[in-house]
Image: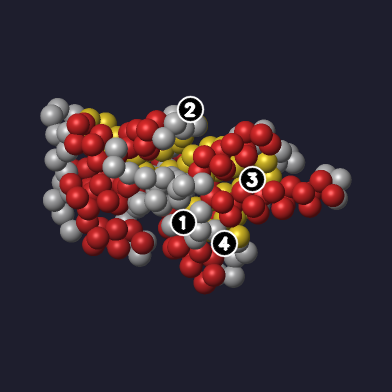
Amino acid sequence: MFKIFTDFDGTISTTDVGDALFDRFADTNWSGVVQEWIDGKISSKEVFRRGCESSSLTKQQLEAFCDQQQIDPYFAEFIAYCRRQGHPVIVLSDGLDYYIQRILNNHGFGELQVYANELVFMDHDKIRPEFPYFEKGCLICGNCKGFHLRAHRNDGDILVYIGDGYSDRCAVPEADVLFAKNDLKNYCVERNIPFNEFITFAEVVQKLQQIEENLNRMGK
Ligand SMILES: [Mg+2]
Ligand SMILES: [Zn+2]
């Protein structure tokens, strides 16, 4: 059976919400912190620890910020397609659950299964991250996507992964069908890793349809 995993930031949401959030609310050189992570100098756990620690942000401010965020215009079509075909869709994010859930709710997708790091509100305007899946993963990702793909794989499954960035790297060797754009696309090109290019979920649906038709033709 097909099991479909998708990144959230920059893949479902049109902007990288986590990045934009700390860019706006963290009192630190945020792009410098992100660059250290891209260069492999610090884990994403450390990225969020620094981001949260230097941020002043109330729940109301976060919610107002979330309510301005847009999602891929073809995401609804993609979800409808997966439902018709009976493919489960799971959101895997190395971002923070609170904004992901709020934005999915806003757009009518609140029932999707999400695995992400947790954002905890402390008193008034302080936040901290928690990493419920950290120990199970590669110990570099806060929430390692490779772990979740391995944990969901049963014999005969076709695991599909859709992503756009560096936080998707650990999913790459675990996926049977990979969709990539932006930084993840560049990462695959540099390493000669095969992938399907996409811009929006419209291309993902098209390609999945093709793959399924081919499999049916071959009698699988
Ligand atoms: Mg992303
Ligand atoms: Zn990882």
Alpha carbon separation for disc pair 3 and 1: 17 Å
Of pointers 1 and 4, the one earlier in the residue sequence: 1
- Going by the numbered disc 2, the residue's amino acid type is Glu
- Residue 191 in percent (x, y) is at 55, 69
Q: Which residue is mark 1?
A: 164
Q: Nearer the viewer, mark 2 or mark 1?
A: 2
Above or below, 70 relative to 122: below
Q: Quadrant of the C terminus?
A: top right
Of pointers 3 and 4, the one earlier in the residue sequence: 3
Q: Mark on residue 204?
A: none
Q: On the image, which quarter does residue 56 sit in?
A: top left
Alpha carbon separation for disc pair 2 and 4: 27 Å
Taking the spot 22% from the left edge, 53% from the top edge, the residue there is 23
Q: Mark on residue 111?
A: 2
- Going by the numbered disc 4, the residue's amino acid type is Glu
Taking the spot 13% from the left edge, 29% from the top edge, the residue there is 124
Q: Nearer the viewer, mark 2 or mark 3?
A: 2
Circle 2 crowding by C-alpha within 10 Å: few under 14, some 14–19, many from 20: few
Of pointers 3 and 1, the one earlier in the residue sequence: 3
Front-most of residues 217 and 195: 217
